[in-house]
Amino acid sequence: MNTPISLLMTAPAITVRADDTLTTVADVLARHKLSFVPVCEGPGGPALGIISASDVLHFKSSGGDMDELTAWQICTYKPLSVAPDASIAQVAKLMLERQVHHLLVMRGQELVGVVSSLDFVKHYLAEAGANPGQAGIKQGEQHA
């Protein structure tokens, strides 16, 4: 478990700008099949926060205008981040302690990747020799 998180992270990270509307954010999340996206000051700018699909869904279900609110207004500010050389075990422990499902992988002020709790599930399945796309549960099935 001394494997660096850089081997598990998704890179490059797809981002949105702080001034993007929630309609734009929802489109980016859907188009790229993401559960979250970093919010950056601008192209190549610093990461300011994270916005999740559930943040967008919550706002939309409340009847808010998706074209009037920006990513900056509902993102989680100053998200948890780790260095690319942090071990997978260290990152897993940190995510559990802080009860977060998403974090940024940063080299100084540079966003180099992202990690979600689903990345750990994929890693586990790969280590177990299972095909992550064929985990034994058909799409649409639910198990308690």
Image (spheres, helix red, strand yellow):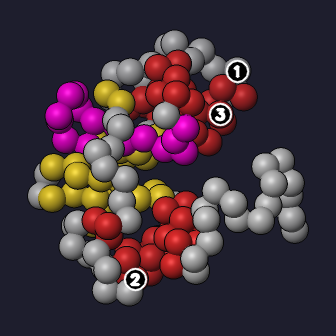
Rendering coords of residue 44 (x, y %)? 17, 34
User: How dense is the environment of label 2, judged by Cα within 10 Å: few (below 14), some, or many (20 and up)?
Assistant: some
Q: Residue at x 52, y 28 (%)?
A: 31
Rendering coords of residue 2 (x, y %)? 31, 86
Query: Do the CB atoms of the residues marked 3 and 1 lie less than 8 Å apart?
Result: no
Which kind of residue does numbered mark 1 sit on? Gly
* Circle 1 residue: 63
Distance Cα–Cα, label 2 vs label 3: 31 Å
| Image: 144 above or below 25 | below
| Label 3 vs label 1, nearer the camera | 3
Query: Do the CB atoms of the residues marked 2 and 3 lie less than 8 Å apart?
Result: no
Distance Cα–Cα, label 3 vs label 1: 10 Å
Answer with the quarter of the image where residue 121 lies: bottom right
In the rendered structure, find residue 57 and report the number of the disc placed on it.
3
Query: Do the CB atoms of the residues marked 2 and 1 lie less than 8 Å apart?
Result: no
* Circle 2 residue: 89
Mark found first going from the N terminus, 3 or 1: 3
Examine the structure image and report whether residue 46 is included in the region drawn in magenta: yes
Which kind of residue does numbered mark 2 sit on? Ala
Mark 1 lies on a secondary structure that is loop
Q: Residue at x 51, y 78 (%)?
A: 127
Residue 44 visible? The answer is: yes
| Image: 79 above or below 100 | above
Range covered by the magenta-colored residues: 33-47
In the rendered structure, find residue 48 and report the number of the disc placed on it.
none
Q: Residue at x 38, y 86 (%)?
A: 1
